[in-house]
Amino acid sequence: MTEDAAPPPAVTSRSVAKGLGTTVLARLGAVVEIVAQPLYVLMFGLAGYGLYAVLWATVNLLENIFDMGMTSAMQRTVPQSASDAEAAGALRTAMLFGVGPCLIVAALIAGFAAELAPFLNVADHDRPLVVPAIRLFVWALPLWAFVEIATSAMRARMVFGAEIRLRIVWEQIMRLVFAGLFFAGGLGLKGLFIAHLCSLGITAILCVRLLARYYNFADLLRGGRGGEVERNTFWAGLSILPSNIIARLFGDAPALILNLLLPGAAGAAAAGLFTIARKLSSVVQLVRIAFVYVMAPLAASAEREDRAQVADIYAYATRLISAIALPLAAVLAAGSSSLLGLFGHQAHVAQGAVIILLFARALEAVLGISQPVLQVVAAFRHQLTAAILGVAVALASGWLILGHLDALTGVTLAMSIGLVVMAGIPMVQLAMGERLHPFDQRFPKVALRGLLVTLAAGALALLVSRLPDAAALPLITAIAAGAIWSSLRFALPHADRASLGKTARKLRLV
């Protein structure tokens, strides 16, 4: 007689915390990217950096359209796969439908680069570079699609830390190193595009090695076609695709819109300034992304076993995000003038945009953790509602705001309003349709104490920002770290702090 297989371990707050630590480290590549931006502006000028920002924003948008939603689909189908062969089938489907269309689109854009180039507003001295830059840089599209799908495949296996070396060392640090070398070699702005491709190419090669550890390549190559897991992956991707596209629009479309609105070098500079504001706000966005990456596969696994586990980790994640994102946003907003000083005096006109984006990203982080939960527990059709309403609100806000504010601040504010609406709708859908919400009896105390820490830290950072930038910046960094620690220590319940394990003990949170 055979014994019954042991049930899988329960998904708890400790499961979230364990995945979160390594995922945060993996996403620290975004922090390295922020540090690199002032150096890019220094080397290539604001207008030149603006051209690079517009082309990279375009690649990001196209990748989110033509990857057919495969990066998100694997977060639903791989954790629910019954065997390694099924997981390999999901990865095979994702690579076929995610990278294949991007290759075709890249080839078409390279062929029509001369016809597309006039749509971009750039400085006069950069105009001769536009056509060759498009033809070269468009090949970042399939490379980026491959890297995104490969790293998503590893996260779907709940291997959250495998991206650390890829994202920090090869994708970001090597890009900066290559850019510096090519600039010193006299390649100018073209060197930045080549550096980006070099870093992506190396990252893609290393992704193959990592995939071989967690997927059976024999199953990947010899598997069948059209099985249930392949169909589920394909249709899951298509269902999530519209919301993915719209979420990416909120991040990258404003840079394109500003470039189209303002002629010549002003359009390139405005795109660069928005990108600077977005990069600074991405410190707060990092909090949400880290939780989303962890929550999607964990929620899928928990939903398979017990809906109560989903409710527990949903409430826990919301409390933890609130304790981190709100004080962090307040300190960075208060010290935004000093932060923008890193990019030169011309960047200070973006201060309003930076403050708006920081608080919008904080609200998105608190509300938006509902989105990965909705993706795995609700019907596919429910995932379109938030995306459609978010875009409608952003367009309506832009129509009302533009003309009353400068273009940069107006576009940023309209986008931010839509972003917060889009983040909040899934929370309402889960509460109404699935009877799931994160606001248990512990949340009010967490919110009140966290708000007090946020106000105190923001006021202190505002005072420090009056100092010269060289003195203010390290103090603002220290205040941000202290605010997060204080919020975690005094706002969170003991059980939440204890779930952080060794980290909690080392930081004396428990």
Image (cartoon, rainbow, N blue to C red):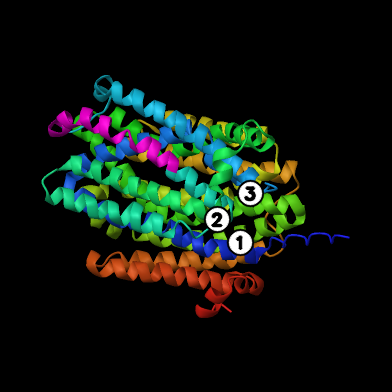
Q: Residue at x 19, y 34 (%)?
A: 265
Whether residue 44 sits left or right of residue 382 in the image: it is left
| Residue at image mark 2 | 291
Q: Which mark is residue 16?
A: 1
Is label 3 in contact with label 2 (beta carbons under 8 Å)?
no
Q: Label 3 crowding class (10 Å Cα cut-off): few <14, some 14-19, many 20+?
A: some
The three-letter code of the residue at mark 3 reads: Asp
| Residue at image mark 3 | 84
Chain-order first, disc 3 or disc 2:
3
Magenta-drawn stretch, dominant element (helix, strand or loop): helix
Is label 3 in contact with label 1 (beta carbons under 8 Å)?
no
Nearest the viewer among 110 and 476 is 110
* Residue 63 appears in the picture as rendered: yes
The three-letter code of the residue at mark 1 reads: Val
CA separation in Å, label 3 and label 1: 23 Å
CA separation in Å, label 3 and label 2: 26 Å
- Secondary element under disc 1, as helix, strand or loop, is helix
Asked if residue 109 is positioned above or below residue 233 in the image, the reply reads above
Whether residue 197 sits left or right of residue 310 in the image: it is left
Is residue 33 found inside the magenta-colored segment of the image? no
Percent coordinates x, y for residue 286 in the rendering: 46, 55
- Secondary element under disc 2, as helix, strand or loop, is helix
